[in-house]
Amino acid sequence: MAERARRARRPRPKAWIDVDGCTGCEWCVDFCPVDCIDKIDDPYYAGDGTHQVVIVDWDVCTGCTICEKECPWNTITMVSGVEVEELLSEEVAEEA
């Protein structure tokens, strides 16, 4: 029996939070089935520096889209796995 060539899997989409629109209400935290969303108190991430926001641990996020559907402020967007890799590369370059 001939072996079938395996296609490389595309990375799953991940949740991206617009920190400028995030109110830190933690609604998404309550709905996340894998507990990958955390509230942080870091002025770097808080868009205007006056409020707390939530961020996603992309290593844990499964791309289920529940947070995006449940966010009352519509600040969560699912981005493709390729975009996540690009965003992470940019973040690493900025830190260097």
Image (tube, rainbow, N blue to C red):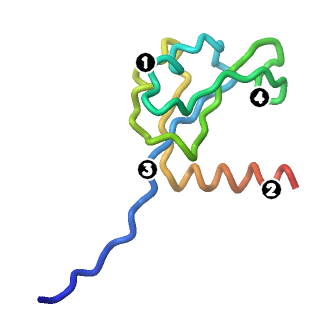
At a point 58% along the width and 28% down the height, the residue shown is 37
The quadrant in which the N terminus is found is bottom left
Query: As rendered, which of 20 and 44 lies closer to the eye?
Result: 44
Q: Amino acid at mark 4?
A: Tyr
Q: Is residue 77 above or below residue 24?
A: below
Q: Measure how far apart labels 1 and 4 are at the Cα level.
A: 21 Å
Q: Position of residue 61 (x, y in %)?
A: 50, 40
Q: Measure how far apart labels 2 and 1 are at the Cα level.
A: 32 Å
Q: Which mark is residue 12?
A: 3
Q: Secondary structure at mark 1?
A: helix
**Horizontal arrangement in the rendering, residue 22 relative to residue 36 (left or right):** right
Q: Measure how far apart labels 4 and 2 are at the Cα level.
A: 17 Å
Q: Tell me which label, 1 or 4, sits earlier in the chain.
A: 4
Identify the residue under disc 4.
Answer: 45
Q: Tell me which label, 2 or 3, sits earlier in the chain.
A: 3
Identify the residue under disc 2.
Answer: 93
At a point 60% along the width and 55% down the height, the residue shown is 85
Q: Amino acid at mark 1?
A: Glu
Q: Position of residue 4 (x, y in %)?
A: 22, 81
Q: Tell me which label, 4 or 3, sits earlier in the chain.
A: 3
Q: Amino acid at mark 3?
A: Arg
Badge 2 density bin: few <14, some 14–19, many ≥20, Cα 10 Å: few
Q: Measure how far apart labels 4 and 3 are at the Cα level.
A: 24 Å
Q: Measure how far apart labels 1 and 3 are at the Cα level.
A: 19 Å
Q: Secondary structure at mark 4?
A: loop
Q: Tell me which label, 4 or 2, sits earlier in the chain.
A: 4
Q: Tell me which label, 2 or 1, sits earlier in the chain.
A: 1
Q: Tell me which label, 1 or 3, sits earlier in the chain.
A: 3
At a point 51% along the width and 20% down the height, the residue shown is 28
The quadrant in which the C terminus is found is bottom right
Q: Secondary structure at mark 2?
A: helix
Identify the residue under disc 1.
Answer: 70
